[in-house]
Structure formats: structure tokens, C-alpha cells
Amino acid sequence: MKKLLTSIFLFSFCLSMSAQNSQKALVDYVDPFIGTTNFGTTNPGAITPNGLMSVVPFNVMGSSENTYDKDARWWSTPYEYTNNFFTGYSHVNLSGVGCPELGSLLLMPTTGELNVDYTQYGSKYKDEVATPGYYSNFLTKYNIKTEVTATPRTGLARFTFPKGQGNVLLNLGEGLTNESGAMVRRVNNQEYEGMKLLGTFCYNSQAVFPIYFVMRISKVPAETGYWKKQRPMTAEAEWDADQGKNKLYTKYGKEIAGDDIGVYFSFDTEENEQVEVQMGVSFVSIENARLNLETEQKDNHFDKIYQDARNLWEKNLARITVEGGTEDQRKIFYTSLYHLLIHPNILQDVNGEYPAMESDKILTTKGNRYTVFSLWDTYRNVHQLLTLVYPERQMEMVQTMLDMYREHGWLPKWELYGRETLTMEGDPSIPVIVDSWMKGLRDFDVDLAYEAMYKSATLPGNENLMRPDNDDYLSLGYVPLREKYDNSVSHALEYYIADYSLSKFAQALGKKEDAKMFYSRSLNYKHYYSKEFGTFRPKLPDGTFYTPFNPLQGADFEPNPGFHEGNSWNYTFYVPHDVYGLAKLMDGKTKFINKLQMVFDKGYYDPANEPDIAYPYLFSYFKGEEWRTSNEVHRLLKKYYTTKPDGIPGNDDTGTLSTWAIFNMIGFYPDCPGLPEYTLVSPVFDKVTIELSPKWYKENELIIEVNRNSPEDIYIDKVTLGGKQIKKYRITHDELVHGGHLIFDLKSTK
């Protein structure tokens, strides 16, 4: 009887555990620490989906205890996993970018005598916890537990103090931004308001802009006031500065402005007393920052705000559900989806107001106005995934891009909080908008869109913000190397892709002559092909090739004539709109395939460099070689995407590298931007269900299923779509969504 009862108990326990596992929340698969080292530049801070506000632990500044460079302005992220010196929480941050910016309004709790020198008041920490909408650590220097959460436009911190004197500091001088100027004004002893300068992203000195804030603290302080870091003027002053003495403290005065200023609160606390600090922000005004704070945190406590953020993340992640695969694969997948949903993020306040593009005007939107368009990266896959899974968001992003054209006269290239940074190259808005339109997202002014695209494609270079070298491009058919490191080949390859997209758009709109002209331009990539090296090679204005030339120069970000952030091998196959033409240029299928395979075999492929991330899908254009696509994709996923802090191969580039993993794990990839097609690749999971928006798609869901005998079965044997077997490895967007049910039969051998 005893054995029977034990068996019944074990059986019941197993059933219970199985039920718990099957009901695991999707947010619990997300590990925000993935990508926080290895230059992934993601962070584990608190944020809501596409939220303006993020609250991030800042650990890249100020102490010999840090592992790397001590100046935060060398970093493009507020947080690096291997660092361990915490100097506060920064508010409003960028995720996965390659240049430092934002990451300001640093909020820091301390205990004991007041000290406002960040090189001294920072602390080591332990017990880090991060999950969507929440982050926490324990400051070992002060025995303070810190926690943060967020709403779309506000942040909330909760500090649990030990008994004694506690302090809360707001440092307005430091951060990732190159700007150190600010203004802050006391409203009362528990509330301050002000403005902090941000800008010069990727060292563009023109792109400077303000962030406005309102800060409130829950405990009445015994003392509060300002500080200003004094600039050393004499040897004696410099000595004083080294001792941390060269500061101005004042508890008097209504406001203070200048470089390197801050605010402090001091109070007596009981053991485990909790103090909360609210932060509302706006890019419009202090009044709007306060309105955002009062609207989004009204009568809500920390736990409620965190639970709301968690619920919002769960709802967003649930657009795609996966079954099968390993625990680690589910973590990689949902963390990647989490990264996708950080940028672009909303810009407007709760009343709809936002700063107009490159203007001092304040406008009002009825929907969402988005910002942080890292388009050189995201035009390749991010917007395609948003179109499929979050079409309502993608539609608003396209509308935002067109509004930017209305306000500024140009579509965005790399827009940041209403400023055009002109970072990277190309004309990337074109394939984004065309791709959306081709897939049925047409709720925008098509004539205006075409006008904007035509303008950047045809204006002379001295008038052209998007294509400054358009004179050469139009007259020669290519961009020549005029300065040693001018990225000329990279520029032209981007223009070819934009012109191909524009040709398809013109054709669809009945503009036959335009379509013919732009398509003809898109094939001029052939100018760069050097038969001597079998690669693309910079060309001089007289039509001769640049010499001396080394196709491998440019690895590891070394300067490279003609190419941006890569070498010739990273760009030579980047002609996704004319794969067969490129193969012909390389003397046919066999040589093309062998050369492409060599790129992978010799390690020339760079998984962190956007132009070549579409290389694996080129095999599938050729009958009998399709197996190589799944072979390389699964190898790359296994090697470069893990659950460790270095689990992204490089800068996530506002979700681009994460999106590469998402598409490949579910079974298809949009390898040609602007063309509404996908290349099939064997999925990682046994079943994937994608919720489709009824406004944009007739079907309610897209189901992808896999039949395999073991995880080693990665090669496609048969594909069925909508109950009918298909013999091809590329399908259109319409075929995919209307087919409704995609089934892969996999095998273990090619």
C-alpha cells in the first residue's frame, strides 16, 4: 500500500510539474543579460515594448575597479556584463547600437556622508536579477537593494536602505552622451524638474537636443540641494579636485544650470526602509514630462507598475508561440523577440505631442510617432518581421517616416529623437516602405512616398542628403574612390538595392519608364567586379581599379578603401536583387557556389556585419545546392547564438542580429529587402504559431510544423503549404500567409 501511495504521489507530482512547465510564461524565457558583452551592446534594464523610457544599470564609468576603459563616452552601451562598478541608473537608453548616446539622468543611492564624485560614490554589486520590465541588484558598498521598473514614458526606482543616513543623487553631468550641460529647478523638497542636453550621436555635432524631466522622491529629505563640479584652475585646485573636494554644494537657490551639475537628497532611514524615486521624461517640455508621470504612475505602486510591464511583454511575445526545441533555444528565441521590440520606440507624450523632425516645432499625432530608425541595419529584416507579426506597428512606422519627409523634406536614414544623424550610408527608407506596400500595408499616401523616393534617387549630390555622391553614381554608374577611406563601394551597393526596390514600386504604380530606369541602375554593380580577384573592388574616377588591393583588408574594423566596416568578401555577394546575374559574372553556377562556400569555410563570413548576413540563402537559388542554406544557418545559429552574455555575435543593431535568429529559427528569411519573398530554411522548433492581425490578413494565424526523427534532421526533404506540396525553396509573402499551414519534412542527410 505504501508503494502504491508513493507511486500515486510521484505520478501526481510529475503531472503537476509537467503542467507547470507547459504553462511557463513566455517572459520567463527572456534573459536580458544575453548580448550584454561581446559588443552586443544590449542591456538588462527595465523597459516596456517599444517604450520611450528605459531604466538601465550604468556600469561603464569611473573606477579602476572596472575591467575596461573608464570613460563612459567610449562606450556605446550603459552596461557591460563583465564590469562591476555601478554608478547609478540611466534613463532613456539605446539598445544594440555602435555609437555612444543618451544614457543620462543618472540616479544613485548611497549611505553615509554625502559624496558626489562618481569615481568615489560608485559601488560593486551582486545578486543581479533581470526580466522584462524589471532589474535589481544589491550594492555591496552600501548594503542597499536597488530595483527599477518602467512604464512607456516613466521610470520608477525602489531603494531598500539600511539604518542610518541615506542619500539619493541625480547626476546630470555624466552619461553616454558627449553633452554635459543641464538645468535643474527645485519645485519642492521632494520634486525637481529640469532639462539635460543630449546629442552628437556618432560624433555628429549638429544633432543636439534636450530631454526634459520631472523627478519625485517618496521620502521627505532632511536636506536637499544642488552640486556643481568646479573646473580646476590652479595646481592647488587640481589637488583639491583629486581629493574630491572641488565641488560646490548648496541647499539654497531655486535652480542651477551649467555643465556637470546634480541634485542630492539626504535623510535618516530605518532598517529595510524603502524609498521610491519617480522619473518622468519628455522630448517636448517639462510640463509634458510631469503629465506623463502623473498619467502613467497615478496611484500606482512599484509592484503594480512592474506587473503591468510584465503583462504587456507577455502579450507582445505571445504573437509567436513555439513548441519543441530545447530550453536554451526557447530562451534564445524569446530573448531575440524581446530585443526586436525595443526599437524603434515611441516618441510622443501622452497628449500626442512630439518634436517635429529637424525643427523647433511641436506637433501632435493621433497614433504613435516612432523614433530611433537605425535603417542601414533594420531595413534588412526587422521591418519585414514587424510587417508579418506586428503590422499595426510597422504601418505607424511607415507613416512616421512619411511625416518626417513632410517636416524635413527627406525620408530618414538614421534618425534619433527628431534629429538626422546621417550615420552609415545608402537610402534605406526606400526598401522599407516598398516592402511594406508590396505586402499589403498600404494605409499611407502612396504618391507622397513615391515623391520622396524619387527625390533622393534623382537629385544632384550637392543637394542630396541621402545620396551625397549621386553625381558620380548617375554619370558613371558607380561611386568612384575619391578619398582613400570614403566607403565608395559600400555606398553604391546600397543605392543599387534602393533603386531595385524603387523600380518594383514604380512598376506596380504603372510608371513604366521610371521602373526601367531604376532597374537598369540597379544592375550597375557589375562595374565593381574584378575578375583578377573574383571580388568587388574599388574603382577610380577614370574607370581603373584601385591598387594595391587586398580583398581581406578591412577585417576587424581596420580602415579599408571602398568598404565600410568590413572587407571585400563581406560585400561581394551583396547583390540580393540579381543573384543569377552575379553568378553569371562569376562564370556560372559552379564557380559561384564554390566561391560562396569558401567564404564560410575560410571564416570570411562575418555574422555581425549586415551586408553578408543574407549570404546563406543564396545557395537556395540553385537547384541541388539548397541543402547548403540549412547547413550553414544551423551551424551559425549553434556557434554564435547562445544563452550566455556573449550570445549575440556583435552589435545587435537595434534588433537586427536578433531578428536574423528569429526568422531562421521559425523557418524562412527575407533575404532581398523590398522584395516580398522568403527563402525557406529548416526550422529549429517542432511547431510555430504566428498570430496574424485580422485587419491586415484574412487568416487568423500561420502555423509552421516540422516532421523529423531527431534534432540532427536539418535538411529539407519535402515542403507542404496549404495542403499542397511545393517544389521550390522560395515563397512569396502572400503564399506564406494565405497558405496558413507550412509543413517541413526533414531528413538527416543532404
Image (cartoon, rainbow, N blue to C red):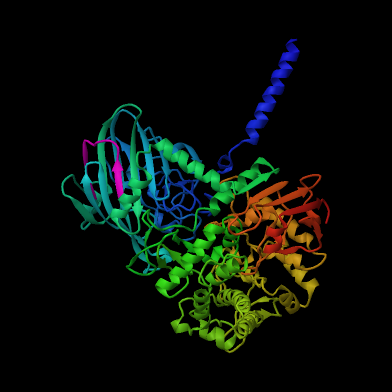
The quadrant in which residue 674 appears is bottom right
What's the residue at 22%, 48% (across, down)? Answer: 186
Q: Position of residue 665 (x, y in %)?
A: 67, 52
Residue 42 in sight: yes
Name the one closer to the observer, 319 or 440: 440
Name the one closer to the observer, 47 or 687: 687
What's the residue at 79%, 73% (across, down)? Answer: 589
Task: Give the number of marks.
Answer: 0
Left or right side of 203 for 235: left
Left or right side of 414 for 573: right
Look at the picture and state if 507 lies above or below 257. below
Look at the picture and state if 415 lies above or below 580. above
Q: Quadrant of the N terminus?
A: top right
Q: Main secondary structure of the magenta part?
A: strand
Residue 231 in sight: no
Q: Position of residue 427 (x, y in %)?
A: 53, 73
Does the magenta segment cover residue 388? no
Q: Quadrant of the C terminus?
A: bottom right
Q: Position of residue 32 (x, y in %)?
A: 53, 45
What's the residue at 40%, 43% (across, down)? Answer: 86
What's the residue at 78%, 62% (across, down)? Answer: 626
Left or right side of 74 for 592: right
Q: Position of residue 467 (x, y in %)?
A: 50, 78
Name the one closer to the observer, 221 or 72: 221
Does the magenta segment cover residue 224? yes
Residue range corresponding to the magenta coloring: 214-227
Left or right side of 330 for 202: left
Look at the picture and state if 501 lies above or below 237. below
Which residue extends farthest top? 1
The quadrant in which residue 624 appears is bottom right
